[in-house]
Image (tube, rainbow, N blue to C red):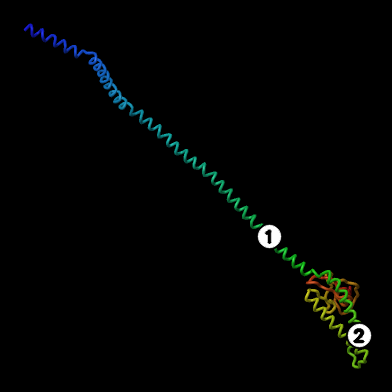
């Protein structure tokens, strides 16, 4: 028995030594604190989760409030963006209206310029021979005076001598020349008028009164005598007719 006990004691000591080796002690020292640390951490996490529900809700509410404010600010921002766009659109519309008005005015002015230019060209064309016509009317007057020098009695006489026949032939030639000349001048717009033929009223724009005299049976301011015939060039008075006017008052 004593021997068995003595043999068992060295074995127990050996096993104790093995279990008490530095490596085992180090492993145990490392494992125990770790396991001991997990338990309080898990309990702390559970506690924080349990007690953090109400603050989390408050935090969620506070986070939601800025989002709503953000939406409102976004709407206000959109309104602020729309105002400049409307103003810019109104400015563009005004500019378009202004440009359209300028365009229409320019077109109207251009058309008026065309019309004026056309009228000026036509006027220049119609009265291009005005200076020539003024110089020509004196010759026409001389031809008219030559025709007026032949008495009407000699032209209508029954007995015609040889000299009278020559005078009538000369008169007919001058009359034909006068007719052809006046027809040619009329084609170019130059016309002769005699206000005493139709008994026209005195018109200071067309007539020049050289004398006035009372006459029975005729209205006042009536032309009764033409001293010099007048001329018109395309409706414009080139030379006024010199006339005698009735003045009964």
The spot of residue 5 in percent (x, y) is: 9, 8
Which residue: 73% across, 66% down? 119
Which residue: 49% across, 42% down? 78
The spot of residue 133 in percent (x, y) is: 83, 72
Point out the image quarter for the N terminus: top left
Instruction: Left or right? Give the position of 120 relative to 50.
Output: right
Neighbour class for label 1 at 10 Å: few (<14), some, many (≥20)? few
User: Would you identify the image quadrant in which residue 153 lies?
Assistant: bottom right
The spot of residue 98 in percent (x, y) is: 62, 52
Sequence-wise, which precedes: disc 2 or disc 1? 1
Q: Are marks 2 and 1 in contact (CB under 8 Å)?
A: no
User: Would you identify the image quadrant in which residue 152 lies?
Assistant: bottom right
Q: Is residue 66 above or below residue 216?
A: above
Local secondary structure at mark 1: helix
Depth order, front residue of 77/138: 138
Camera-side mark, 2 or 1: 1
Tally the marks.
2
Which residue: 64% across, 56% down? 103
Which residue: 42% across, 36% down? 67
Alpha carbon separation for disc pair 2 and 1 = 61 Å
Instruction: Left or right? Give the position of 144 relative to 111.
Output: right
Which label is found at residue 110?
Answer: 1
Q: Is residue 95 above or below residue 128?
A: above
Depth order, front residue of 19/64: 19
Instruction: Left or right? Give the position of 35 relative to 212.
Output: left
Local secondary structure at mark 2: loop
Q: Which residue is mark 2?
A: 151
User: Would you identify the image quadrant in which residue 246 lies?
Assistant: bottom right
Depth order, front residue of 22/242: 22
Neighbour class for label 2 at 10 Å: few (<14), some, many (≥20)? few
């Amino acid at each position: 028995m004593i021997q068995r006990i003595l043999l068992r004691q060295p074995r127990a000591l050996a096993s104790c030594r093995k279990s008490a080796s530095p490596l085992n002690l180090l492993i145990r020292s490392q494992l125990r604190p770790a396991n001991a640390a997990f338990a309080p951490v898990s309990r702390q996490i559970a506690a924080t989760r349990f007690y953090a529900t109400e603050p989390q809700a408050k935090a969620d509410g506070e986070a939601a409030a800025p989002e709503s404010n953000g939406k409102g600010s976004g709407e206000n921002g959109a309104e602020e963006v729309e105002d400049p766009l409307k103003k810019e659109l109104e400015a563009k519309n005004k500019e378009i209206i202004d440009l359209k008005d300028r365009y229409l005015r320019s077109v109207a002015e251009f058309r008026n310029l065309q019309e004026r230019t056309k009228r000026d060209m036509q006027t220049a064309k119609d009265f291009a021979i005005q200076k020539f016509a003024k110089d020509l009317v004196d010759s026409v007057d001389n031809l008219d005076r030559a025709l007026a020098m032949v008495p009407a009695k000699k032209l209508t006489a029954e007995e015609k001598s040889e000299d009278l026949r020559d005078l009538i032939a000369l008169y007919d030639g001058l009359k034909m020349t006068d007719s052809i000349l006046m027809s040619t001048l009329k084609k170019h717009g130059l016309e002769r008028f005699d206000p005493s033929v139709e008994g026209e009223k005195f018109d200071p724009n067309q007539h020049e009164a050289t004398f006035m005299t009372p006459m029975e049976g005729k209205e006042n301011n009536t032309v009764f005598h033409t001293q010099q015939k007048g001329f018109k060039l395309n409706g414009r008075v080139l030379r006024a007719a010199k006339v005698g006017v009735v003045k009964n008052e």
